[in-house]
Amino acid sequence: MNREELRRSVEKPAQKMKVVFEEGLTDTLIRDLGNESGRLPLLEFTLAWLTFERPWGKPYATKLPSDKLLSNTHLQKLKVDKPDKRDRLFITAKFQLASPLLIRSGQDLIQNKCSPDVVHLHSYRKDKPEPVVSGTSLAGVLWHRAERIVNTLDKNLQIVYDLFGFVKEESKQAKASRLVIHESLIENTVDIVQSRIAIDRFTGGAYNGALFQEQPVFSISKKEDSQKINKVKGKLKKSSNTSSNTAHIKLELELRQPKGYEIGLLLLLLKDLWTGDLPIGGTSSIGRGRLQGVEATIVWQQHKWVISEENRKLLISKQDKDEMEEFFKKFLEQAP
């Protein structure tokens, strides 16, 4: 929708309900929306809160009182005065890249030049491609490990289906996922092209003409270190960044309507990511995609648990540890 169409979509419905906008408010709303995708739901949300609990059913007088006007003052001082009663679990975890990461993409990131055969997935942020971990990639990794945990403990796979959703084409049944995983930006990294060869598994030798190039992302402790790394040309020197608290990835998960044993399963998945036992991305067979936990914050209702690591030592209070142990017990005892 162009600017004029947005203006009509805001003002026409308001005119039918005898609502008057302060002069300039519509322009402020449209300008703040920008050109990002998803701006219409954002506009709908803003207008809904501006008109929250207002009696629009009755038409107003010709001269409206000042408190009946939708003004810029209302927009700037917009506050949610009611508590959020939605039952949701939030996990925010920061990780270091313990090894290079490669989520395959066919993107051509080098204009007018030959790109490597495989590059890491990038997303444009402020007109610049930045390496990311997509939510779907992480969801697939967590789904596969959750199935493995459930099968190992001889539990019902319905637990996994309730979390991640399912699609049964034969019976035309489907269920949406209750676990929301957001796309994550990878920071403090550098792209380095590596050349590899394909191996003939029968002879153990190299395939003739099977030389290919990959461009994973490597972690660095500081952005200015990228110049030194480029001079090395692929020979990444091992530095002290693995022992520092420099975070490269922040993963954000949200579980709607969580049950106690489901929280226990998510904590097991977090533990596997934290210790590097659960790699993400491709080429994990050659050591790529392994993470190292830095800090994790878990929020549910009025509870908040914090886990951190310093000098390879896990830092967590005894109370938080005991409370999270209860979720593990619920998963072992109450999960169907």
Image: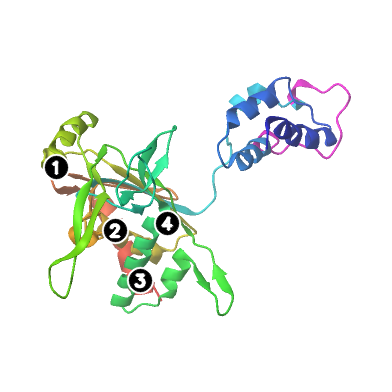
Residue 263 figure quarter: bottom left
**Which residue does the numbered mark 3 point to in the structure image?**
147
Q: Secondary structure at mark 4?
A: helix
Of the image marks 1 and 3, the number of the one nearer the N terminus: 3
Q: Seen in the image, is 300 located left or right of residue 323?
A: right
Residue at 11 percent across and 39 percent down: it is 239
- Residue 288: x and y, percent? 22, 55
Give the main secondary structure of the magenta stretch.
loop
Q: Earlier in the sequence, mark 2 or mark 3?
A: 3
Residue 95's place in the image compared with 18, above or below, is below
Query: Which label's residue is closer to the chain start, 2 or 4?
Result: 4
Of pointers 4 and 1, the one earlier in the residue sequence: 4
Of marks 4 and 1, the one in the foreground: 1
**Residue behind mark 4:** 136
- Can you identify the residue that label 2 sits on? 282
Q: Is residue 56 magenta?
A: yes
Name the residue tied to disc 1. Answer: 236
Magenta-drawn stretch contains 54: yes
Q: Amino acid at mark 3?
A: Glu
Q: Amino acid at mark 2?
A: Gly
Quadrant holding the C terminus:
bottom left
Mark 3: which secondary structure? helix
Q: Is residue 142 left or right of residue 208?
A: right
Question: What element does badge 2 sit on?
Answer: loop
Q: Disc 4 and disc 3: Cα gap in Å? A: 16 Å
Query: Which amino acid, by three-letter code, is at mark 4?
Result: Thr
> Which label's residue is closer to the chain start, 4 or 3?
4
The residue range painted magenta reads 49-67
Residue at (42% x, 71% y) in the render: 159
Amino acid type, residue under disc 1 in the picture: Leu
Residue 304 appears in view: no
